[in-house]
Amino acid sequence: MYNCNGALVSELNQADQDTLHSFTSTFSLYETVRLHQGQVLFWETHYFRIIASLRRYRFGIPMHYNMEILKEELLKLHTQQNPTTENALFQFHFFSTKGNTQFIISSKEAHPIGLQTQSYRVDLYKEAFITSGNLSNLSSTHRGLRIMAARYAEENGLEDVVFLNERKHLVETLKGTLYLVQHNQLRTPKLEAGCQDFALRTVFHHWLENEQTSYDLVEEDLNPFALQQSEALFVLSLEQGFQTISDYRKTQYSQEKITPLFTAFAASLD
């Protein structure tokens, strides 16, 4: 089921034809939102990211696109589709039809946010680079590159890949924000490196800075050698939660330091 500008349809081909044509043939920006235990997580942070992205891409912002209305449209879809589901992922797509900004919302059930500790092999993706700078903070900017990288990972038996920017600095992974654990530091690429400014990244960093954790957050330029110099690596994403990385090339990583960090952060979501 889909929410097309407020109208619920069971199939996209039931949507208004002008809307459907614009959605399938023009540029769109998107934002993924998480339903966690029946509550929309970090909605205010998501909303401001949506509005900032619309402005950056020079989309018109209708007057009724306020925080309450867009959340109501998301919950309208959830209530109609599967109101008993407590964990889901919603995706907003915004696009323009004859100068008018429109949206389509889709959703799917999801596992609860958790700590994923299964085998998870990664390698560098060096066939193309993320461009450093704040335009790359927007999720739609390198959509095609991520599709190619996902194919590369599949062909090479990898669960994920790590992107580099044109300066050969680490950016992020295909699935989310990358963190390197070194002693009492959590090191992650800074936004200027070209990583996406996910709402979850923003909230996690705010939590780290305001809670009494044993880690200092360091946002900086990181070269690939830092991966093998780390005690542990993990990826943070709305879909997977904390995903520990088990293998990078010939290096294997411990998961012991990740568990208490995840447990403390997950408790803050309840």
Image: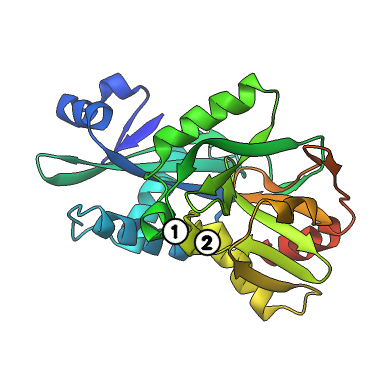
Task: Name the residue at 35% across, 22% down.
Answer: 11
Question: Colour scheme in the image?
Answer: rainbow
Disc 2 marks a residue whose amino acid type is Phe
At mark 2, the secondary structure is loop
Q: Kindly identify which residue carries mark 1.
A: 46
Task: Name the residue at 29% across, 40% down.
Answer: 28
- Horizontal relation, residue 142 to residue 150: left or right: left
Q: Nearer the viewer, residue 154 or 256?
A: 154
Disc 1 marks a residue whose amino acid type is His
Q: Kindly identify which residue carries mark 2.
A: 42
- How far is disc 1 from disc 2 in space, using C-alphas? 6 Å
Q: Which of 57 and 131 is in front in this view?
A: 131
Image quadrant in which you'd find residue 267: bottom right
Image quadrant in which you'd find residue 10: top left
| Residue 251 seen anywhere in this rendered image of the structure | yes
Tell me where residue 145 appears, x and y as whole percent.
Answer: 45, 35
Number of numbered tags placed on the structure image:
2
